[in-house]
Image (cartoon, grey):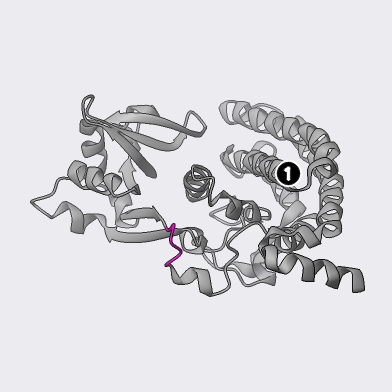
Amino acid sequence: MPMDANIQAIVMAHPEISSWIYSQFVQLWGCSPEQEDFFVYNLNPEYWYGCPYIQTQEVHKEILLRRQKVSIIDYIIQNINCDSYIVMPVDTYYINAYNRKSHYPHEMMVYGYDMEKEEVFIADFFSNHYSFSCCSFRELISAVYASGDFFDWHNIIRLATIDYEKKSPKHIIGHVNGFDFTVVTQLLQDYIDGVNSQLKYRIPHVTGDWFMFNVGGVNVYNILNQYAIDCFENKKHIFDFRPFYVIKSHKDMMMQRFLYTKSLLHDDMNNIITAYKTVMDLANIAFQKSIKLSLNVNASNGTLIELCTKLRKTECAIYQRYIDVLIKNNDLNPIYGDEYKYKAKEYNEIS
């Protein structure tokens, strides 16, 4: 999802606050292929609104475009100079980096500019994966000002600014502000058990609160397999490779979490990291296979289903080992802070 990728890109660019992200994007959920909006999602509550280190402001595109004294380019430059990222709806047809032959709406992030070349630096899913590129001022103006029925709902420009001083009220209403062993353990156990965490914790999602109709964790593979069968054997849907990109990016983020944990716990993570490379390879092969299937409707989906089955079995064994490491080292949980670590260790010894 673009919102997931944009948040990850912003937070990971600021090492001093990046620990927050390692408590996020642990669990997956998906909806039945029978639903019109079938997809697989990261379980990340409220997206922008759930990150305590990002302050956001929103403005309707039409309000901005009606202002006569400030052009869209001036607006972007002024906000970038104030250390903001701009996430805005565009018609991707006008942006060369998308290489699209038809009009299609999407949110694109702008994070910098070059006045000499009259270009802005942009981020989105170019060439089937999240990446960075640039576009001319002229391209951007055409893409933003483009009209069409689809922009009736795709019309919010969002400014995202790092909240270094923690002034946001999100810091005092129970949000996880750093890497928390306990949160990761709970969500990862839900993942292994196939629990619908969205229903369990009543977490709202931007696409709707379909609590009762979703599946969670490893059960996502069941609906992916059913989706592949419905597309290629039953001819019910046109195949979309993007859910398999979510699976791949989930494994990439898990490896980053393992590496961060290694920086805290050192030797306990070596075997887990080595073993997990197999999981990443399987996820990448499944993603590449899904792209090929999307280009050939007559291809066989058998290999993709086999990969999903093997992926599920292999990763769960590794996640259980990781949970054991976190529980064993809970007295080093960084969320406690130095003043609490001794008390935590004392409590664990008594328990």
SS class, disc 1: helix
Give the residue type that dot 1 points to. Phe
Q: Which residue is depicted at the point 67% across and 62% down? A: 335
x and y, in percent, of residue 187 in the image: 72, 60
Quick check: 116 left or right of 310? left
Q: Which residue is depicted at the point 34% across and 41% down? A: 110
Residue toward you, 318 or 344: 344
**Residue pointed to by mark 1:** 258
Residue toward you, 174 or 153: 174
| Mark 1 crowdedness (10 Å alpha carbons): few <14, some 14-19, many ≥20 | some
Part of the protein shown in magenta = 163-167
Q: Is residue 298 visible?
A: yes
Quick check: 331 left or right of 204? right
Q: Which residue is depicted at the point 29% across and 34% down? A: 113
Residue toward you, 350 or 296: 350
x and y, in percent, of residue 225 in the image: 73, 44
| Magenta run includes residue 254 | no
Quick check: 90 left or right of 334? left
**Quarter occupied by residue 185:** bottom right
Q: Main secondary structure of the magenta part?
A: loop
x and y, in percent, of residue 20 in the image: 59, 55
Say if 81 sits above or below 133 in the image: below
**Quarter occupied by residue 24:** bottom right
